[in-house]
Amino acid sequence: MVLRLIQYVDATGARAVAARQDDGPAAVVPGAASVYDLAQQAIAEGKGLAAVVAAAGVGEPVDLAALVAEGRLLAPLDHPDAAHLLVSGTGLTHLGSAEGRDKMHKDLADPAKQTDSMRMFRLGLEGGKPPAGAGADWVGAQPEWFFKGDGGIVTAPEAPLSSPAFALDGGEEPEIVGLYVIGPDGTPFRLGYALGNEFSDHVTERQNYLYLAHSKLRPCSFGPELLVGPLPDDIRGATRIVRDGQVVWEKPFLSGEANMCHTLANLEHHHFKYAGFRRPGDAHVHYFGTATLSFSDGFTTRPGDRFEVEAAPFGLPLRNPLAVKAAETVAVTAL
């Protein structure tokens, strides 16, 4: 049985957590105001998250359709202090479609196309997964890594992803997200996984790869449901863009280790090997990368477009409309 958790605001305006098995009905987790609190309880008691949820019992039923319609969904993990939730990601981790893999291998064989991105991808192909006979202490190649921001950039499911006025593009990136809480002794604990839309400025990134850091400082979204337990090896989902009620771009996407050139454990190691990312009490949201973008197909998004990401293991789809913030002038004041 698959356990999934949903954070939301109830009819009284209070925070609450719901749980459901497989695609069955959702019910309140009694006494739980946040997934973060449940994770802290699990860590303190030396139990798994699923065991803590089971021990809490089953509360009143929750109408998920009403939560969606009334805009009461929350991201499935947050932190009481948004500055202590860190959002990051790894790129060039996925093999892509058969057509994409074929093109990639041809490019890898062409010295004229040995860009830094190609070299990084090759490192993952050759050293992102352990060879036969590798021991438990095996460490693979470092992936591309980037920082997106803290909890202040997290956008709830169904809420607008607001691109800054200075952005040159606002494009979706359908990904799987790992969700973590750091224990009192600095141990990272994985709560589970969620669907994610990492959302980036691909036009800015394309100008020069040194602009990657700029292009990633954008809002993001994940959820609505947190999948507790292991990630399936082969995930097959769909991502689409809806404009004025019509699907204007759609494509399948693949994820899971069967479709990646790195193991999840290798990606996690190269994030949490830094002591600064093992600060007790912090939460982490880490995007594992994608190989499917509307931008790669030459599609240009517009304000009002709705991004949709779905995959069977994750329950409800992740949906967010695109918005653009008003321009603002920022001036530095000398003290």
Image (cartoon, rainbow, N blue to C red):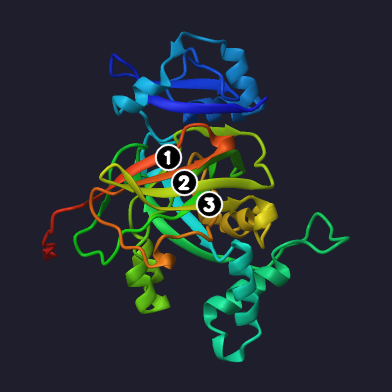
Q: Choose the circle earlier in sequence order: 2 or 1.
A: 2
Residue at 56% from the left image edge and 66% from the top image edge:
92
Left or right, 24 with respect to 321, comes to right
Q: CA distance from mark 3 to mark 2?
A: 15 Å
Residue under pointer 2:
196
If you read the primary sequence from the N terminus, does the residue marked by circle 3 or circle 2 appear first? 2
* Residue 188 in the image, given as x and y percentages of width and height: 60, 44
Tell me what residue is drawn at x 59 percent, y 62 percent: 96
Give the image location of residue 310, x and y in percent: 49, 41
Residue at (51, 55) in percent of width and height: 276
Relative height, residue 223 to residue 307 (above, below) = above
Left or right of residue 304: residue 183 = right
Residue found at x 65% / y 28%:
48
Q: Where is residue 81 drawn, in percent x and y?
A: 36, 38
Q: Mark 1: which amino acid?
A: Leu
Q: Amino acid at mark 3?
A: Pro
Q: Pointer 3: residues within 10 angstroms few (<14), some, or many (20+)?
A: some
37 or 329: nearer the eye? 329
Res. 263 image quadrant? bottom right
Q: Which residue is under mark 1? A: 318
The answer to whether the residue labelled 2 contacts the one labelled 1, judged by CB atoms less than 8 Å apart, is: yes
- Where on the picture, by quarter, is residue 128? bottom right
The answer to whether residue 156 is visible is yes
Helix, strand or loop status at disc 1? strand
Report which residue position mark 3 lands on.
252
Query: What secondary structure is found at the residue carrying circle 2?
Result: strand
